[in-house]
Image: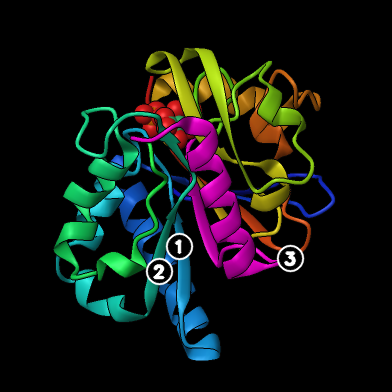
Amino acid sequence: MEKTLVMSASSPPIVRVLPDPQRLAEAAAEYLIESAHRAISTQGGFSLGLAGGSTPKMLYQLLSEEPYRGRVDWSAVEVFFGDERCVPPDHPDSNYRMAYESLLSRVGLGVDRIHQMKGEIDPEQAAREYDALLESRFGAEGLDLLLLGLGEDGHTASLFPGTPALHETTRRCVAQFVPNSTTGPSWRLTLTAPFINRCREVLMLVAGAKKASVVDRVLTGPNDPDHLPVQRVAPESGRLIWMLDAAAAGMSEP
Ligand code: 6PG
């Protein structure tokens, strides 16, 4: 069951619906591998931004094992993060820890090719450092591929409704205190919409019936980016792809 919906937008996103979380992870893995091959063959390297939360974990575990692992030249991959909770890298809430345990520690990536958002230091300092890293590494461009998730409140990365980061127009990474984040009141580091929208490809990964309502509002409802921050994700010249499982697409079996 694959259904492709092309939504009306300046650069219409492609929406693919997969039957279940396993097939969603497999489809995302295939897409990421193709994206990596394209980037590595044309420019010699692949810059990949990882999403946090729980949804991408199955994808990361899949990529860390054969037959997927050997299909990526991991020595040519450079890893960045879409956002981070301001906690130490070994904290259970750390997006870095989740990615490291499920993928990065298993594919032989050199530590110099993993760019952690430093959740363990002062948030504003960490944001300044990451912003400077992104500017020096990408200039006016963005990542080759950025993975993003979607919260039930319409947030993506750590761009939560009603937070200052939604209105950032120049910096690539900012820190902000989020009173009602998915991990409770917490400081967060996040990529901003201007940088996200300079990425060549953005892949939204959404699974589970709990997301069906927000997916429907985001993809078929009115434009309301203050209340639905993920609607700010609209790559300037890049490609936006949504991959949903049937439950998140509101198509799960009755
Ligand atoms: C985070 C993520 C966040 C996540 C959504 C969905 O730090 O929490 O970056 O944006 O993608 O909250 O999370 P789940 O995949 O756990 O539903």
Q: Which residue does the numbered mark 1 point to in the structure image?
A: 48
Which quadrant of the frame does ligand 1 lie within? Answer: top left
Determine which of the numbered discs, if any, sits on residue 78 in the image.
2
Specify whether residue 127 is painted magenta: yes
Distance CA(mark 2)–CA(mark 1): 6 Å
Judging depth in this view, the residue of 250 and 238 nearest the camera is 238
Which amino acid, mark 3?
Ala
Q: Position of residue 202 (x, y in %)?
A: 58, 54
Give the secondary structure at mark 1: strand
Which amino acid, mark 2?
Glu
Q: Is residue 254 left or right of residue 132?
A: left
Residues at circles 3 and 1 in contact by the CB criterion of under 8 Å:
no
Q: Position of residue 120 (x, y in %)?
A: 33, 35
Q: Which residues are magenta?
A: 120-149
- Give the quadrant of the C terminus: top left
Which amino acid, mark 1?
Leu
